[in-house]
Image (cartoon, rainbow, N blue to C red):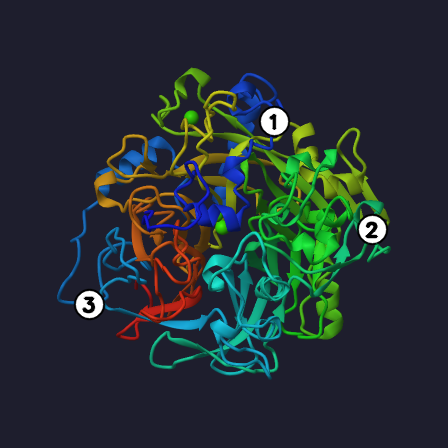
Amino acid sequence: MRIPLPLIRTSSGSHEGGRSALTCRFRCGDACFHEVPNTTANPYVGDVIAGALSRRSMMRAAAVVTVATAAGTAGAAAGAPSAQAAEAATYKPGKPGNPGKPGAGSGARGLRFQPVAPNTTDAVTVPEGYGQNVVIRWGEPILRGAPAFDPENQTAKAQAGQFGYNCDFLALLPSGERGRQLLVANHEYTDEVLMFRDYDADNPTREQVEIAWAAHGLAVVVVEEDRKTGKLTAVNRHHLNRRITATSEFRVTGPAAGSDLLKTSADPSGTKVLGTLNNCSGGTTPWGTTLHGEENFNQYFANGTRATDKRYGLPATGSERKWERFDKRFDVAQEPNEPHRFGYVVELDPHDPTSTPRKHSLLGRFKHEGATVRLTGDGRPVVYSGDDERFDYFYKFVGSKRMKKGSSRAVREYNMSLLDEGTLYVAKLTGDSPAIEIDGTGKLPSDGEFDGSGEWVPLVTATAKGAVSHVAGMTAEEVCVFTRLAGDKVGATKMDRPEDIEPNPRTGKVYVALTNNSRRGTAGNPGVDEANPRIGNKHGQILELTERWNRADATKFAWSLFLVAGDPNDPATYFAGFPKDKVSPISCPDNVAFDSYGNLWISTDGNQLGSHDGLFGVATRGPRRGELKQFLTVPTGAETCGPIIQDRRVLVAVQHPGEVDGADVANPASTWPDGPGTYVRPAVVSVWRKDGCNIGA
Ligand code: FEO
Ligand code: CA
Ligand code: CA
Ligand code: CA
């Protein structure tokens, strides 16, 4: 929902994906206005149907899936039409709510709450019977010596000790202290017109730029649990609290470490990078660290005309924030390799405030939405990551070293090397229905499902002895720095903006959020295919992968579309076969998470149905598979991010509240969370049940 306000500069033209012009400008550098960076002629799903994978090999992949299901999962098979029909037939509609029992409602276990209706309220709206509190806001002091938030007199020094701007990914880890957890947050980007009164975008001051550097990055904050509710409060000035910013030191690991492609005049070693930028989503590792995706890093660099970086969309002239005026490393004409040092998955050990975070080049360089990890049966890490750009790819990394147990410094150091040896793969998908049946309207093909098989195509393998490229014409370090080009060369499948990816801890199936792609099937762009079946896809879809996830050598998978998002009254939507009159409308799925019951939770970015963004829960198995219910909505202009579903609380990051075309400090579109007369502030919110019971139980 875009709220028109008078005056002020806005970018012209229509914005895609339901976001305001302001969000596009600051978050991704107006990526949607630019040409699609993937202009390669890779085959897409429809093209390869009669090609590389024959019907026989697809049946083999399906057989593999059946084995995996029998061996390790208790849930429904991958949505066979007959199973879906049976589920629909046995479905007993629940009462819309149970007014006598606040907090209760019908639904799958973990999803028994009364759904929140779509709305445009400037607040976090939660189900009846639930409470909420702001855990921490932009600018709250977290380090010793940091001053209280004073937005009219903000300084870079103050910001470096305070919670950063635009919180996105969230992790909660054990803190080692009773009743306390360690909260780790990404600070994806800054929105200067909402941070600074009378901001002059053409002439930012050095102090404003340095405040922005300090407001980017990561935060570690100890949080305390309220014993009666799920409420969390920040513990300021705890010794574990930490800020990582756009100027903190990182060490590059993997095949690109020390490469000529990463050397700059400030760092002739090619291993020491200052800062992390545009950290969107992320993941928590089984060894107790956190991963953070560097997403739209391209927008921070000016004068980016180097041919090799054309696939990454570096601005040809000045950057939006003009950082190049204050540090020449942001000027590609002067430091051509500096952009090669961003676009990675970074790893942080939040338990050691003195540790140097890493940039893992073996996980590839692209617009990483996030990175989620699980272990194979023999203890090796598997990492999934999406490249959030229209017509780009999604990836999997399989490590060759086994995780060690323990928390000594030596064990932690060893485990932080797990992502430096192994193989990076990119996904290639094939549909199983005739291409003519994928007509672009979202109508299901005659076999009743958008589904098929896929393979993980290897790009690069690294061992202790060195790295080997699997891509003709590219060295291993080139694959790690220009990973999009490697994906192009092996014919990876062009997807509708791959966002967060998450394995279901209960069933092993993997869920890929594809947020939208307004260019799909339009003139001059790739057409529809079975995995991306709608022309001008406004609302996105969620892909479900079934693979032998507990085996490190699983390179085949089966897939189906679990959700095709939108208004359930729109015939082009699909909710895993669940009756569509029983589900909440959803648009633009972005971050995904699981609760302990194996329900999928989905946060949205850019609702195109007239409601604010929100958080939804949906059962992934059993008779209620596909029953999607809205749990909360966020304030005006905001995106819902970083969901964490613990038994007693739901945590969300309310990112870019008030980011509406024409808004600024003097003319705010939102005054959340503190009301009129205050600055709108991105913040983390905890939601819990007022009666102290578990969420949705
Ligand atoms: Fe930062 Fe892909 O959203
Ligand atoms: Ca099909
Ligand atoms: Ca997004
Ligand atoms: Ca996101």
Residue beneath disc 3: 102
Quadrant placement of the C terminus: bottom left
Left or right: where does residue 504 sit relative to residue 340? left
Considering every residue shown, the one lying at the far left of the view is: 100
Residue type (three-letter) at the residue carrying disc 3: Pro
Residue beneath disc 1: 39
> Which element is circle 1 on?
loop
Against 156, residue 11 (above or below) is: above
- Report, in whole angstroms, how far the alpha carbon at label 3 lies from the one at label 2: 60 Å
Which x, y percent locates residue 104?
22, 64
- Mark earlier in primary sequence (1, 2): 1
Taking the image as drawn, is residue 63 in sight?
A: yes
Residue beneath disc 2: 263
- Report, in whole angstroms, how far the alpha carbon at label 1 lies from the one at label 3: 53 Å
Left or right: where does residue 411 sit relative to residue 161? right
Mark 3 burial class by Cα count in 10 Å: few <14, some 14-19, many 20+: some
Which x, y percent locates residue 407?
67, 73
Q: Is mark 2 within 8 Å of ligand 1?
A: no
Question: Which residue is at 54% across, 42% downward?
Answer: 388
Residue type (three-letter) at the residue carrying disc 2: Lys
Quadrant location of residue 474?
top right
Residue type (three-letter) at the residue carrying disc 1: Thr
- Report, in whole angstroms, how far the alpha carbon at label 1 lies from the one at label 2: 29 Å
Eye-nearest disc, 3 or 2:
2
Which x, y percent locates residue 208?
58, 64
